[in-house]
Each structure stands twice: as C-alpha cells, then as structure tokens.
Image (cartoon, helix red, strand yellow):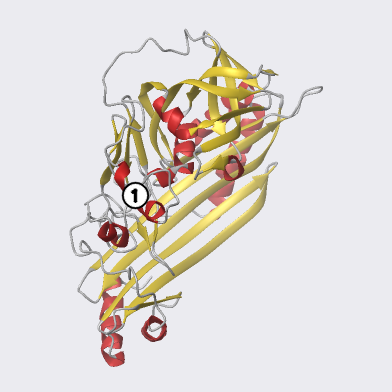
Amino acid sequence: MTKVQEIASYAEASARQLGIQKFDIYGASVDETSVQVDRGKPKQIKASNRSSVIVRVWNDNNTMGVTSTTDVDPKGVELALKTAYEASFFGVTENVPDFSPEAKNPVADIPNEKAPQAPASTLIEKLIASEQKLIDAHPAIQGVPYNGLAQRDIDRFYLNSNGAVRDEARSYTSIYLYSKTEQEGKKPRSAGAFKISRSLENLEIEECLKEAAEKTISHLNYQKIKSGKYMVVFSPEAFLSLLGAFSNLFNAQSILDKQSLSTPESLGEQIASPLLSVYDDALHPDNISAETFDGEGTPTRRVPLITEGILRGFVHSTGTAKRMNTQPTGHANIGAKVTVSPHFYHVLSEQAAESAYSLEDAESVVLIDELNALHAGVNALQGSFSLPFDGWLVEKGNKTSLDSATVAGDILELLKSIIFVETKAEVTPSGVCPRVWVEELSITGE
C-alpha cells in the first residue's frame, strides 16, 4: 500500500481543489498466502492481496457522505472524495459521526514489524508433515479433513483533514488441524486445535499437533449422559465464545439501539460473581493481532468491562461516547455506518483465594471444551442459550467423552453462578482466559 504520508499529501491537495474542508480516510490491506492439503497432497493454494479504503466527507451543512474504494493513487482518492462529497447531501442529520477527539493522541508503542513470508512450497511441506503425524498418532484417526496453514501481512492507516496521520503494519501466521476418526460400530469422532504466532518460525506446530491428537483420542470412548443439572467447567475457548455471543452486554451501540441486555444505567450494577473480572485489552502482550488504533484513529487501550462482578464499562466509538457523555475507547469500525466491536478479552479473578475445586477431585462435573451452533442457539436479546457442545464427564480426574449433549441456560444467571475462576490462563484467538467453574447448568443428553 502507498505510504500514508503520500496519501495524506495528495488527498489534501484534491480536497482543496474540490472545495472540501473536512474529510477522513481509513484504509487496510491484507497480503495472504494459505494452503490446505488432503492425504499428503496439496488440496488448495491461495494467494491474495485485498485492500479496502473508506473515505468520509462532511459538507458545510455538517452532513456526511461515505464511499469505498480499492484505489489509493491520486486519481482514485480524488474520485472517492468527490463521490463522498456528493453523497454527503443525502447523509443523516441526527447523530452525525465526527472526528475522534483522540485521533491525534499518541498510540501505544508495541512491536509490529512484519515477518518475512515463507514460500507456499514451505507451507505445503510443513502442513503435509503435520497431517501425516496426526494420522499416525492413533489407528482410529483416518484423516484430517479440515486443515490450513496461512500467513498474513496487514497494513492499516488513518488520516483526516485536521492533521491526524497514523499507520501500522504487522504479520501473523496460523495453523489449524481438525481430525476425524473411524471405528467399526462407533460414530465418527472429531476434534481440532488452532495456533497463531507472529511468524512461521515461532508457530507452535508441534503443540497444535499434540493438542489435536489428545483431544481426538479422548473422544473415542464416549457415552451418553443422563439429562439433568450438573456443575459445569468451561474451557477458556468455550467461555470466551459464550462471552462473545453476548457481547451486546458491553457494546455501547447495541445499548443505544436497545439491542442489548444492558442499558446506559446498568453501569455499577452487580451482573456477575465477585470472582469474575473481564477486560477488553487490544494491547495485551499475547494478542498477536493487536491494533493500536481503530477505524476512527482513536488509540486502543485496556478497558474494564466487569470488575469483581460489577459492570464497569462499555466499548465505544466516537459517536456512542458523545451520546453517552464519555470518551471513545478505540472500538470503532467505519463503513457505511460506524459499528462497535470488541478486540481481545482478558478474563481473570482479582480475588486471590484458594479453592477446593479441582478436576482431580471433582465428581460428575461436565467439562465443556467447545460450544457449537452459536449462530442458532443464542438469543442475545433475551440472554438465553441452548448449545450442543464437545466435552467430557469428569469423575475424579477421569474424563469420559459425551455423545450428543446440549447445555442450556441464561447468561446473566450463569455469570452470577460462577464459583471458581482458575489461575492458569490460556491464550486463544479471541482472548486470554482460564477455566471457569459454574455451579449448575442444564445438560440434556440424547
């Protein structure tokens, strides 16, 4: 992508020629190479370079127009500015988006250099070797139908007519392996693992293999579970996926649109067990895809959402922050309209208390590893969920895989029923989180 200072220079020149006084531009490009294999042979090799630039222009009546383009040369930017200016006369007149008051504030100084990309042939070799090792891990593993190894370079920039100019670049590499078993007289069982790193060199491929194999093997001897109420332990990935499904709890735009379980007056309420604290921390050192600014140029930061069970904050754009008389938090995505979304959760307990809860001693505890069908089994406006899951029944450290089980409950009741948050946290693509124990949830067997 063209250097941001060059874009700022000719965008300013074009705006002057067009008589435009106020505009901003956000852009991102992704250079990606990904491979998939099937039984020792390349299945798919993809290389792509995708770019997207959003241009917003305000007219003298302070209404705004938006357009998008993939062309950031002088002619492309001039045409985008002109189109957005023409569209501005049809823009909304209430709650018109504006520049972030923090668009010129310093951003965090974190490492974001790009890593050298390996050739596709190297990716294929490593993935074929990983596939074969996973198949060799157990006679029942007959294939790895879903797999992928990808590397991405990402460039982002933001600039506006008020003099804000910022950009960043980063790389990351990821692998996923999802195996499938076949045994006579038994249902096929599947499990997988995912790892991400800043470079191929540091990618934990062996750890991904080990995790996928152990999970798959642990699901071979399965049994049905009797329907009823059980103490439930959520894996880090499962708890974060459930938290993400109900992110409207913290989303200021959802709250203003009355599409949330929270209201502006909910701040300060006890919505969870005092054992639970949740932060949105884009700059967490374990966040491989950390962003230092959002689509409006606002610096990202660590935002307290729940502190010892009390709702402490929402994630904001400039517009939602203005309407709720607070500061933006660096969570805006600009486009035809501005949306708000979380970055990277950090879940922990800030109460340093020892607990008697341990899977080594627990009896009839359901350990949920992965929640499925989140798109269909969650009613985010009512707070209810009913989700099939992969997991185990744990009896004093012995895990037995469960066949066709569903967990159901209410998110607010679940948060208040947390009885233990373990101290050892795991890093997942959506956040850092330990295992979370919940006193009682409904489990339905087949």
Quadrant occupied by the C terminus: top right
Q: Nearer the viewer, residue 149 or 268?
A: 268
Q: Is residue 194 above or below residue 37?
A: above
Badge 1, how many Cα within 10 Å: few under 14, some, many 20+? some
Give the structural element (helix, strand or loop) at label 1.
Answer: loop
Left or right of residue 296, residue 395 in this image: right
Q: Nearer the viewer, residue 79 or 408?
A: 408
List the single residue furthest toward the right.
185
At 37% from the left and 23% from the top, the residue drawn is: 421
At 50% from the left and 32% from the top, the residue drawn is: 410
Residue 101 image-quadrant placement: bottom left
Instruction: Give x and y (percent) for residue 430.
Output: 43, 42
Q: Look at label 1 and name its amino acid.
A: Ala
Quadrant occupied by the N terminus: bottom left
Instruction: Give x and y (percent) for residue 406.
Output: 62, 29
Instruction: Give x and y (percent) for residue 362.
Output: 49, 10
| Residue 107 can be seen, yes or no | yes
At 38% from the left and 65% from the top, the residue drawn is: 334
List the single residue furthest toward the front.
265
Number of marks drawn = 1
List the single residue furthest toward the left.
105
The residue identified by callout 1 is 290
Residue 253 image-quadrant placement: bottom left
List the single residue furthest toward the bottom.
17
Q: Is residue 372 above or below residue 296?
A: above
Q: Nearer the viewer, residue 78 or 61?
A: 61
Q: Is residue 402 above or below residue 32?
A: above
Q: Nearer the viewer, residue 22 or 359?
A: 22
| Residue 115 can be seen, yes or no | no
Instruction: Give x and y (percent) for residue 16.
Output: 26, 89
